[in-house]
Amino acid sequence: MKCSLFGCSAAAQVKTSRETKGQFLSVNMAFSVGVMSAMYLTKNISGAHFNPAVTLSFCVLGQVPWGKLVPYCLSQVLGAYLASGLVYMVYYDAIMEFSGGVLTVYGPNETASIFATYPSEYMTLGRSFLDQVVGTGMLMLCILCLEEKRNTPAPSELIPAIVAVIVLGISMSMSANCGAAINPARDLGPRLLTLTAGWGTEVFTCYNYWFWVPLVAPLIGGVIGTFIYLFFIHWHLPDPDPPESLSSLSTINYNLVNKLCCIDFYKSFVISISQSLHFD
Amino acid sequence: MKCSLFGCSAAAQVKTSRETKGQFLSVNMAFSVGVMSAMYLTKNISGAHFNPAVTLSFCVLGQVPWGKLVPYCLSQVLGAYLASGLVYMVYYDAIMEFSGGVLTVYGPNETASIFATYPSEYMTLGRSFLDQVVGTGMLMLCILCLEEKRNTPAPSELIPAIVAVIVLGISMSMSANCGAAINPARDLGPRLLTLTAGWGTEVFTCYNYWFWVPLVAPLIGGVIGTFIYLFFIHWHLPDPDPPESLSSLSTINYNLVNKLCCIDFYKSFVISISQSLHFD
Amino acid sequence: MKCSLFGCSAAAQVKTSRETKGQFLSVNMAFSVGVMSAMYLTKNISGAHFNPAVTLSFCVLGQVPWGKLVPYCLSQVLGAYLASGLVYMVYYDAIMEFSGGVLTVYGPNETASIFATYPSEYMTLGRSFLDQVVGTGMLMLCILCLEEKRNTPAPSELIPAIVAVIVLGISMSMSANCGAAINPARDLGPRLLTLTAGWGTEVFTCYNYWFWVPLVAPLIGGVIGTFIYLFFIHWHLPDPDPPESLSSLSTINYNLVNKLCCIDFYKSFVISISQSLHFD
Amino acid sequence: MKCSLFGCSAAAQVKTSRETKGQFLSVNMAFSVGVMSAMYLTKNISGAHFNPAVTLSFCVLGQVPWGKLVPYCLSQVLGAYLASGLVYMVYYDAIMEFSGGVLTVYGPNETASIFATYPSEYMTLGRSFLDQVVGTGMLMLCILCLEEKRNTPAPSELIPAIVAVIVLGISMSMSANCGAAINPARDLGPRLLTLTAGWGTEVFTCYNYWFWVPLVAPLIGGVIGTFIYLFFIHWHLPDPDPPESLSSLSTINYNLVNKLCCIDFYKSFVISISQSLHFD
């Protein structure tokens, strides 16, 4: 919710001031400040889950129970909806001034992109899907390592700040194509707000019903990033001190492996790699 | 005082160089550096209070005695006045060059906005009031959690830096409408300076006596943000270890509740929520 | 690999959006975020070596065995190749739109500079070689001191962040001439990608076969920077507490000196300086 | 030396690329990165003194012996000279391309401002002197508090980073008038380089022999900032635990007071304030 509040406000500021009071970069920066604040605010309450793609990845890792996935995601969407509603109220005058009172999705005076993300016009569907998968995969890969004691952990009290820098990096480098939602809730909530606030159904139908891409692709990208992390980083890390701190994450991996047993061709592969890495 | 010194200087630099030696973003950044420096400088002397809205919120929380509120606020205004006077002296030549010697509040060569904040022309009064309430509410919500041991506390030695980042985020995302004063002293002090230094009474009368908005709205917004923090975050935090560290902030809440007993319809509501949260 | 992924993506974003969705500065920032993320991710696996110039310097210092130099470098080039391939896939539509489908190295619609570095047209060969030597030398000088306990060490958990800031500083100040590769792998990998992806052999032949400069010069610059660090900083540091923590780095220096014995005219000079500094 | 190296390089990059490869902000940022790197590099060797104004202030405070003042300052100027020489060599082609081979101090193609600072044309002498006094005063005020244990100390391992942020803040807000040298060595060294490298004596004679302002004013400003710190902050800090950690800085103050005894009218005033503050 906070990241939508900061991010959408900054987008509104830059858009309605026609880039005189900020630039593309300041939208990226405001989003990442929002992520930092939200993490400091909610870490010990909801576990700082405000991205369904991240929540899903933690479910896969066994760190969040699957039963919490849907309620978490719904509350994330609700939070983003409320935050963008607040932005809409604060920037109502500015949006009306900028758009001449006509709330549209297309054209030079469009204001829908203040809230939800839309693809650049040259994008094909598959490419924009890939864009979201890669962006979210990068996000998971970068944040999963931060708390790993066996690697170089970031100072735990500064993890929100470092996650913010990572989000800034991704949004500076992966937002040209589709706006770098990399978060289904951050995209769906504000899109629902524009639907209800006067932009009409075009926010969902435009670009050939593109809206489902930032909902589905980040979920897939997050899980892919998580697996890449497990395969290429996590199982290569040195064991710190075998008996007692038999790292609980190792256990998680085996649980994970068991859950994956339906994917037969992976199972033996995963276990053999895992063992060769752990017992060599 | 320091944040006015940095911030107004940067505003003067950007304005008088016609954005060749900085941009809107650098004004935002300089303000937040000023906040950081001022916090490192004065934390253990005046408690780093340089925002009446924050001071009032801490009074409500019982962490600053009510008797100190008015003296603190007056000295905050005085500090901002002196700082902006220094900026005026340093940038006198530049301001004269830029404005052609005519100090005005309106027009392309206006220089009043170097010091105090003024609304964008399209803003209605209610909207600009809301803008300041929301901005200051965000500020309180973001900074109140930073020292909370039961949540993810920020490293105490780096809190000034993190507050600076939060202030940067707010001023990047909430300054298009009214300049993001979110601090009555930071606004009134420099406005008094412009009154006395040659801009005339227009600095108070312009935009239909708008000057009272950044004085009153942040106070209200700060208190609202504080209550949102208490309701939605603070009372949901896990108790760390019950008996001894019976967290002093819990006590504060009950004191707070007692103070609020005039607001009858809140009292029972607050206590019941509080208990249901604490004893479930 | 990560730094290429972030950096090249940002370059693609800025280039293909014709600087509407970022600026030169955001490319620099994204590269440094990539460096930070890559360091957090791989520190305890491959020792965070993703720059052959840095790896070579650590070989010279005796902290990485010489036998690992070539495999490390090859995997660094491979990683950069894969990362830039991913960027190519994600930004394929944008690159085609921007370039009109013609992938070139020269001209206003060139897109080769998204991936590898190319010199400014006014550069002479010797000057561009010097540019890379100085840039990489600065890098080594700045990062070698960060872990030194006898100096002001940076907090070890934040070293990735501080290295990122240093890389940002170098790329803001040393990239006008030749793009600040300061990393042979980061340059060769993406250049090979452009060779195979349709830009043709021009990526190697252009500017009179300039491509070898960012391969060779950083290696030399890194070693020079390392020696400057040893001569002017390291051997001047106070011994912390003589007997037990007989700093392992001192030992390294003597190993280093032994390795350098082929360079006869240096040997006596180095030893005498070293002794005069250590036993005075 | 390092800050000149980073800063002048960035200035050369921005200037010679005609702001296509950086902006005014990136020069400010590069300078502050240079300050950070230099502090990490030299803290335990030369005490990280690369600003004569800071060195003088520490002499006044009794933390650096007076006898070291002149040698330190000379080596600081020498370092800045060498660094700017290196920048000149690296950016020689770019400077020649930009200036058409004519090295001048005035005009649209001037390149002298890459190295030393020059005032804006509208500045009067007194105003530019004040500008440097205020800028350096702010610097001292902000950095003196960072190591004070009785206040909110910054984490000692991150002080270089925080000083860098402060320098960034000052150079974003105080560089429009005269380029924010706030460091005699950083200004004189590069100015000498331009004198010897082909810009001629105009670098000293221009703007009515203005060059002495950034030499003298920062020294005065630094000392004023130091006294303001002592009067308004240092002597108001609570004593931590009286007997043993009878803070060595208190002692310093009394030494300082003794040194100031020639300034009679201050002495009694200072002591009485100091005592009233310490023994109340």
Image (spheres, coloured by chain):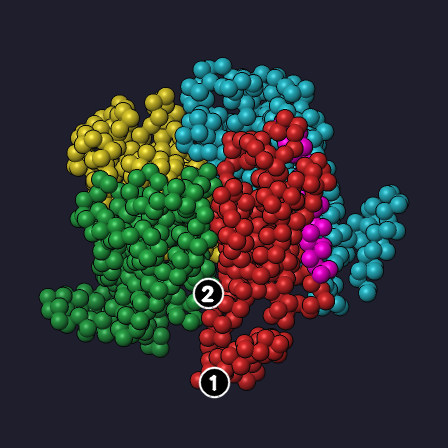
Chain colours: A red, B cyan, C green, D yellow
- Residue A43, percent from left and from top: 64, 59
Residue A279 numbered tag: 1
Q: How many marks?
A: 2
Question: Is residue C222 located in the magenta-colored stretch of the structure?
Answer: no
Q: Residue at x 44, y 20 (%)?
A: B98
| Residue B206, position as x, y percentages in the image | 63, 19
Q: CA distance from mark 2 to mark 1?
A: 22 Å
Which residue was labeled with disc 2?
C41
Three-letter amino acid code of the residue under disc 2: Leu
Task: Please state if B1 lies on the left or on the right of C136 as rendered.
Answer: right
Q: What stretch of residues is rendered in magenta? A: A70-97
| B98 lies above or below B37 | above
- Residue B268 relative to residue A86: left or right: right
- In the image, farthest residue toward the left: C265
Residue B98 in view: yes
Name the spot of residue A267 as percent of width and height, x first.
Answer: 56, 79
Query: Considering depth in this image, is A168 or D277 the residue closer to the camera?
Result: A168
Towards the viewer: A31 or C150: A31
Label 1 is found on which chain of the structure? Answer: A
Residue B9 visible in the current orientation:
no
Magenta segment: does it hold A73?
yes
The reply, left or right, for residue C64 in relation to residue D164 is: left
Residue drawn 68% across the image and 19% down it? B208
Disc 1 element:
helix
Tag 2's secondary structure? helix
Residue B276 appears at what percent x and percent y? 83, 60
Identify the chain of the residue marked 2, using the numbered disc in the image. C
